Structure formats: C-alpha cells, structure tokens
Amino acid sequence: MIKLLSNSVVIIKNFHNKAFVRQMSKFSGFEEKVYQYLQPIDLAKPPYSHACQIGDPVLRLQAKPVELEIIKTAEFKKFVEHLIKVMRTYDAFGMAAPQIGVSSQVFVIETTKKQYDEMMMSKSAGQPIEEIPLKIFINPQIKITDFKVTNYPECCASVCGMMANVPRSKGVQINALDIDGEPFTWDAVGWPAKVAQHEFDHLQGKLYTDTMDRKTLSCMVWQTVNRRGGKISIDYIPIARSKLRKLFFT
Ligand SMILES: [Zn+2]
C-alpha cells in the first residue's frame, strides 16, 4: 500500500482530490509542497479567488522559494494560471502569490492595451504608463539599476479602496525563473519597474503602506462618499476597475 501511495503517477492522477493529497502528505514532503498550489475546491481556503486584505498574516511572511521539481508539475502551472486569472478579474496590473493566500515567491504582472487606454483617459493617471505583456516571475532577485526616485500613486487589491504615492526606484533588473523553470533577466524602467517593485515587495511581506508618502493616503472614492451622503459600500470580491468606475465615478 505504501509503495502504491508513493507512486508519483498515482499521486498526480489524484491531485484533484484534496483528501487524497492530504493522505499523501503523510508519506512525502513533496506532495505536501505541491498540495498548496492546488486550485481551491473550498473557496474559503487558499489559493483564494479573492485578494487577502491588509492585516492577514500571510501578507507579512517572507515568501518561500519554489523548488524546481515543483515548478515542473502540472499543479504548479495551474496555480500560476489561477493567479493570472485573479489578477485579471481584479483588473490589476500585478498579483503576487501571498495575495491569494500562498506564501511562495511567485508574482505576475500585465498592463493590457485596454488598461493603458483607460488610464490615459483618466485624469487621475498622473504618471507615465505603458503596456506590459504578461510576465511571470518565480524566485525573483531584484537589483536597482537607476536610483532616481519616482513618487506616483499606487493602489493594491490587498488594501481595498485606498491609494497613496509611493517612492520607487526608477529602474530595476530582475533575475528570475520562468514558468518552465528557466532563468531569465528582465530590465525595466519607469512604469514596469514600479509595478514589479510593488509585487516583489509582497514576496518580502511588505505592503505599499510601509513605504508610502503617508500624507497622500486617500480613500479612492472620497468624493463619491460626499456626493452620496456617505451611502456607499465597497466590495471585497474581485471587481474590475472599469466596473468600479461605473459604480463610483459616474
Ligand atoms: Zn499589492
């Protein structure tokens, strides 16, 4: 029986079954490590389909590196797909694994043409922005390449409803692994550098509120709060920025 249970083929076939994987974890640390990347069957357990909120201890952990043998598994790839899905559901420019409850060194970033166009039309853009094709970073290391500091507004799916200016280095170089576990080097200046630094910070247990320009912290909908006599509510479920705009800014 133990021999059968330690057979990786049997394990992979049964990865959809959490009870099975839990049983497996008694026999090998490997299964336990893969288990955490399973897509949620129970929405109240990680990996979540929502973003954890500030105060959640998972956002304050130093995230663990992902082992190469784990990166190669189908379950880990599904986890990354899930992370991308949550980022896109929130209409966010990036999402880090701890934000969906998994303290692993993984983050994704993307700025689509639609987001770019929306930001350019918005009077609150206030900063240079550019399209960023989807990029996956696993076990990233960051190096500052341009020490000039920018100080533009940021918001975060884990600090729902708020925004603040955050000083960031203008240029960075990141060395990381891609989805296949292959190392790559990525150089960024301006907008992509800022987005990557925000997500990289999540892997160190840091939030933008730690380093923000404190006087600029704002409720994103403070004008609407006044206009509606305080009768306003903010959802913590994924909601696209375009929908938010429709709800609060029209
Ligand atoms: Zn964030």
Image: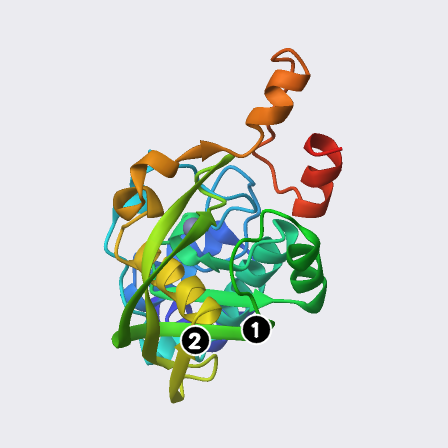
Instruction: Report helix, strand or loop for mark 1.
Output: strand
- Mark 1 surroundings within 10 Å by alpha-carbon count, few (fewer than 14), some (14 through 19), many (20 or more): some
> Residue at left 57%, top 62%?
84
> Residue at left 54%, top 49%?
40
| Residue kind at label 2, given as amino acid type | Ser
- Viewer-nearest residue: 126 or 3: 126
Instruction: Report helix, strand or loop for mark 2.
Output: helix
> Residue at left 47%, top 55%?
20
The picture places residue 191, in percent across and down from the top left corner, at 47, 67
- Viewer-nearest residue: 167 or 160: 167
Using the image, tell me which numbered label, if any, was put on residue 132.
1
Estimate the spatial distance between the alpha carbons at disc 1 and disc 2, rounded to whole Å. 38 Å
Quadrant of image for the C terminus: top right
Q: Is residue 118 left or right of residue 39?
A: right
Q: Nearer the viewer, mark 1 or mark 2?
A: 1
Q: Which sits earlier in the primary sequence, circle 1 or circle 2? A: 2
Q: How is the image coloured?
A: rainbow
Q: Is 103 above or below relative to 241?
A: below
Q: Is residue 138 left or right of residue 40?
A: left
> Residue at left 41%, top 76%?
189
| Residue kind at label 1, given as amino acid type | Ile
What residue is shown with label 2?
A: 8
- Mark 2 surroundings within 10 Å by alpha-carbon count, few (fewer than 14), some (14 through 19), many (20 or more): few
The picture places residue 126, in percent across and down from the top left corner, at 53, 53
Q: Is 14 above or below relative to 227?
A: below
